[in-house]
Image (cartoon, rainbow, N blue to C red):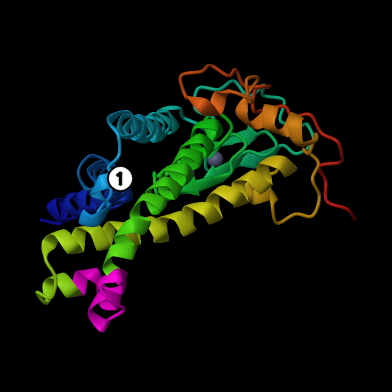
Amino acid sequence: MTGLGSRLFCKVGKLCEQLPVFLNTFLVFSITGEVSYLVLVAAPLEAEQQKTAWSSWWKALHLLGQYFMLGNICWNAFLFLKVSPSIKGVFLGGNGLGQGWRYCYTCETHTPPRCSHCYDCKVCVLRRDHHCVFFGQCVGFRNYRYFLCCLLFMWLGLLYAMVMNAEVFIVILKEGVTLHSILLLLIPWIMLVSGQVSARAFTFAFIADTCVVGFLLVSAFFFFHLFLLFRGQTTREWYSSRRPYNLGPVNNLRQMLGLRWYICWLSPLIPSPLVGDGINFQVTGSLEPCQ
Ligand SMILES: [Zn+2]
Ligand SMILES: [Zn+2]
């Protein structure tokens, strides 16, 4: 019985770990579906504006843009999860005596500078940035490019979806700024459950809300990582006032995104070989804290 209980507990725990991935995927596809619907069926939403209906090529251009962004989000996320940033299978050199090297008692090995142990992934990660709870994977030396590009296209996609959904807000609020319209925008779930609104009105209001909240959240993450990228720092190094790995903005971009840093963000299919091995790093200052 205890064995069955612990197995069940383990399975529930694993399912909970996967939950953010399923939720993210569901939201990304729901938002894309809704903006596609807005373009194909409801643009523009109001009957009096039907005269200015979008031409077929303009709709096709919108759809192309949407699926380009969706493709980039999904492919970058897939590669981010597939490319392991850990030290597993990596020959570390075995000297363990250089500046910045440490010993990991869990992995029982000497680890290079910028490498640290992740207690969620249960392994040391090369140039570890942070453990991403939304994907259940660490961001490190080898998968940083896919993480940042996924974030870039999520930001662009949400910005686009927010502009497209501005009309939904306008249509709801044009009926008058009543308690009903305000509650529909603020608490659509409660309005649906209490039978105050139709499922259609709820879906539009809920997705429009998700776009605004998601955009604010993703903006904060994206600009914070851009800021770190230009400073040549990881999230873990951000606390420190010293920046020994800062090689200047262009070189920092090359270090983080690879040799084709100027174009690789357009698609994960563009190869961009990484500079260095994630073990030895070019430094511009001492790795030891000032005395
Ligand atoms: Zn370790
Ligand atoms: Zn991790």
Q: Main secondary structure of the magenta part?
A: helix
Q: Amino acid at mark 1?
A: Thr
Residue 108 appears in the rendering: yes
Answer whether residue 184 is magenta in the image. Answer: yes
Say whether residue 162 is left or right of residue 238: left
Q: Position of residue 237 (x, y in %)?
A: 69, 49
Residue at image location 60% in from the left, 46% down from the top:
225
Whether the magenta-drawn stretch holds residue 145 is answered as no
User: In the shown orientation, is residue 276 left or right of residue 54?
Assistant: right
Instruction: Say above or below: 189 vs 178.
Output: above
- Residue at coordinates 83% horizontally, 51% vertically from top-left? 289
Residue shown at the point (47%, 57%) measured from the top left: 217
Q: Quadrant of the C terminus?
A: bottom right
Depth check: give the residue in front, 161 or 86: 161
Give the residue at mark 1.
52
The percent coordinates of residue 15 (x first, y second) are 24, 49
Q: In which quarter of the view is residue 73 placed? A: top left
- In the rendered image, the quadrant that contains the N terminus is bottom left
The image position of residue 65, as x and y in percent, is 39, 32
Residue 120 visible? The answer is: no
Of residue 99 and residue 74, the one placed in the foreground of this image is 74
SS assignment at label 1:
helix
Magenta residues (range): 173-190
- Residue lying farthest bottom? 179
